[in-house]
Image: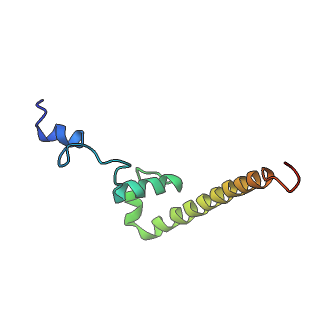
Amino acid sequence: MSVKRLPKRILYGELQSGARSHGGQMKIFKDTLKALMKDFNFDLTLWEALAQNRSAWCGPVIKGVKTYEQQRLQQSSVYSKDQTSSTIGPGQL
């Protein structure tokens, strides 16, 4: 395949500027949505079918948000315990 062909140029991200931009690439809405659904323990193969039925969609969403919030609170409490136990009090140097 020639280097000038469009599929190869798209694959390597060298269309306009000749190179990819520095830093992380732009995320599209679908990427962000999939990342959130993984955090909420959604089955990524069934989410489109569930979204068609509003009553079937609300249950898993509420359950996913609750489990995600519980995990987030547990992680933050562990982090805060680590921070408070590692602080140096006056006269401990």
Front residue of 58/65: it is 65
Image colouring = rainbow
64 vs 19: above or below: below
**Toward which corner of the image does residue 70 lie, by quadrant?**
bottom right
Q: Is residue 41 visible?
A: no
Quarter containing the N terminus: top left
Residue at 38 percent across and 59 percent down: it is 49
Can you name the residue that lies furthest to the right here? 91
Residue at 42 percent across and 54 percent down: it is 34
Q: Position of residue 16 (x, y in %)?
A: 17, 49
**Toward which corner of the image does residue 67 lie, by quadrant?**
bottom right
Q: Position of residue 36 (x, y in %)?
A: 47, 57
Q: Is residue 68 visible?
A: yes
Front residue of 33/16: it is 16
Front residue of 71/67: it is 71
Front residue of 17/37: it is 17
Residue at 67 percent across and 60 percent down: it is 73
Left or right: 34 in relation to 91: left
Can you name the residue that lies furthest to the bottom here? 55
54 vs 72: above or below: below
Q: Position of residue 83 (x, y in %)?
A: 74, 54
Q: How many marks?
A: 0
Left or right: 85 in relation to 41: right
Left or right: 42 in relation to 87: left
Q: Position of residue 29 (x, y in %)?
A: 35, 60
